[in-house]
Image (cartoon, helix red, strand yellow):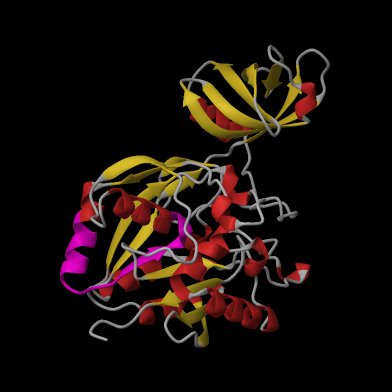
Amino acid sequence: MKLEDFDYELPEELIAQVPLENRSASRLMVLDKETGEVEHHHFPHIVNELEAGDCLILNDTRVLPARLIGLKEETGAHIEVLLIKQTSGDEWETLVKPAKRIKKGTIVTFGEGLLKAVCTAELDHGGRQFKFEYEGIFIEILEKLGTMPLPPYIHEKLDNQERYQTVYSRELGSAAAPTAGLHFTEEILEAIRAKGVQVAFVTLHVGIGTFRPVSVDTIEEHDMHAEFYNLPESTAKIINETKANGGRVIAVGTTSTRTLETVAQNNDGQIIAESGWSKIFIYPGFEYKAIDGMVTNFHLPKSSLVMMISALASRENILNAYKTAVENKYRFFSFGDAMFIRPKKKGN
């Protein structure tokens, strides 16, 4: 399959720059994955789409305030450091701007010396390994000095940092939010539970690679970035009970989906408690073993995420739905509107 097969025209003004004042005020496109038919709603309608006996799987990762602005100790030059992955102890893999100014041994200070970083290795694509030095608790210092690492297509300042976190976020470790979850409020989750739907959690820490474009013409040659996931015993139990009773498994977001399908792929279709690193690449031809439907946002053209949802609802259905979304001026990407890829009703 060719990269061009997953392209679509998107006017720049449809890229949402700020979140809506009310999380659940976003629109919801419902796409029937079998027929390709599209319906237009607002997000609270998701409650009507779920049925007693279903389970809803959410990613409870929390975004680190991982963007730091510091000074190169030697010259006083401003340096931007984005934390990507903790490699061991106080060592982190980072992205640096401007990278050419940072060599092995360079020292960068943040917050008038509250935090100090020594470059221990030069990596590819502007990456640098840093060892951080500080007194106290690293996360508390990070929350004081750092800001949210918003995606590169968002140019507006985010006034309320919590709006780039889901209301159920709790496991610190992501470089980006699992944005399909941003639409949910406590009230909507309460209404879903009241309907007899079980709500359960997985953790997948989203890496910055989620924004890296697919750079190969033949998509089968694409190499996915690795992301840490954890599927707890309690969630495995709920999913297995749901399946045994004929209920549907609905994943919120591509990150929850990646977690569930990684575990299923590792265990011959079985869902068990497991943690590890996922490099799963889902594109048309992939056979879903864990999920039936998905709540998701509208994704970048030619991205691995468009390929993933095309494997669930067919490329033709997805591209037709996206064309309809553009015509109807839906808001796109992280702070944009949502889509529900509707599976068959129970018993159908």
Determine the image quadrant of residue 50. bottom left
- Verify whether residue 245 appears in magenta: yes
288 on left or right of 240: right
Q: How many marks?
A: 0
Q: Where is residue 321 in the image (x, y as percent from the top left)?
A: 58, 80
Q: Can residue 116 be seen in this view?
A: yes
Image quadrant in which the N terminus is located: bottom right
- Residue at the spot 64% in from the left edge and 61% down from the top edge: 3
Q: Where is residue 23 in the image (x, y as percent from the top left)?
A: 53, 66
- Asked whether 240 or 141 is in front, the reply is 240
Q: What stretch is highlighted in magenta?
A: 237-255
As displayed, is residue 122 above or below residue 19?
above
- Asked whether 102 or 261 is in front, the reply is 261
Q: Where is residue 19 in the image (x, y as percent from the top left)?
A: 62, 63
- Asked whether 282 or 206 is in front, the reply is 282
Determine the image quadrant of residue 238. bottom left
Q: Position of residue 27 (x, y in %)?
A: 56, 77
Determine the image quadrant of residue 207. top right
231 on left or right of 63: left
- Residue at the spot 24% in from the left edge and 77% down from the top edge: 52
Image quadrant in which the C terminus is located: bottom left
As displayed, is residue 6 above or below residue 282?
below
- Residue at the spot 71% in from the left edge and 55% down from the top edge: 154
Q: Can residue 112 be seen in this view?
A: no
- Residue at the spot 56% in from the left edge and 35% down from the top edge: 143
As displayed, is residue 82 above or below residue 138?
below
- Verify whether residue 185 appears in magenta: no
265 on left or right of 277: left
